[in-house]
Image: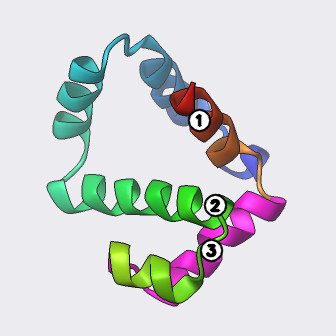
């Protein structure tokens, strides 16, 4: 999957993400880069990934996050068969 999105532009975006040093900087960058609804949607997906790892059901996750079960399925697929990005960041932020 990573090879399908990797190019000079996404390399620059990835480098920009790595350059962020604090939560405040992350908010500043995200607010310039994304719409409020895009930021909210991404945060809900991260919450869904966390809840899936904790063993919550799709219905519990949908009730809390207001995500569709199709989106929750996509997050679950990424957790199981993706590039381990969700697991990597969830492990890091839980420490």
Residue drawn 67% across the image and 59% down it: 53
State which mark lies toward you, 1 or 3.
Answer: 1
Q: Earlier in the sequence, mark 1 or mark 3?
A: 3
Give the residue pinned by disc 3.
Answer: 74
76 up-or-down from 69: above or below: above
Q: Is residue 68 left or right of residue 72?
A: left
Q: Position of residue 55 (x, y in %)?
A: 67, 69
Give the residue pinned by disc 1.
Answer: 89
Q: Is residue 89 left or right of residue 66?
A: right
Give the residue pinned by disc 2.
Answer: 54
Magenta-colored stretch includes residue 89: no
Q: Position of residue 15 (x, y in %)?
A: 51, 19
Outermost residue to the right: 81
| Callouts 1 and 2 close, C-beta under 8 Å | no
Q: Nearer the viewer, residue 14 or 85?
A: 85
Residue drawn 33% across the image and 63% down it: 41
């Amino acid at each position: 999957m990573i090879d399908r999105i990797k190019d000079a532009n996404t390399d620059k975006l990835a480098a920009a993400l790595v350059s962020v040093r604090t939560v405040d900087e992350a908010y500043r960058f995200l607010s310039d880069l994304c719409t409020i609804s895009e930021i909210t949607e991404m945060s809900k997906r991260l919450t869904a990934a966390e809840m899936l790892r904790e063993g919550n059901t799709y219905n519990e996750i949908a009730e809390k996050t207001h995500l569709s079960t199709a989106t929750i399925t996509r997050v679950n697929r990424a957790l199981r068969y993706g590039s381990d990005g969700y697991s990597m960041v969830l492990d890091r932020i839980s420490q």
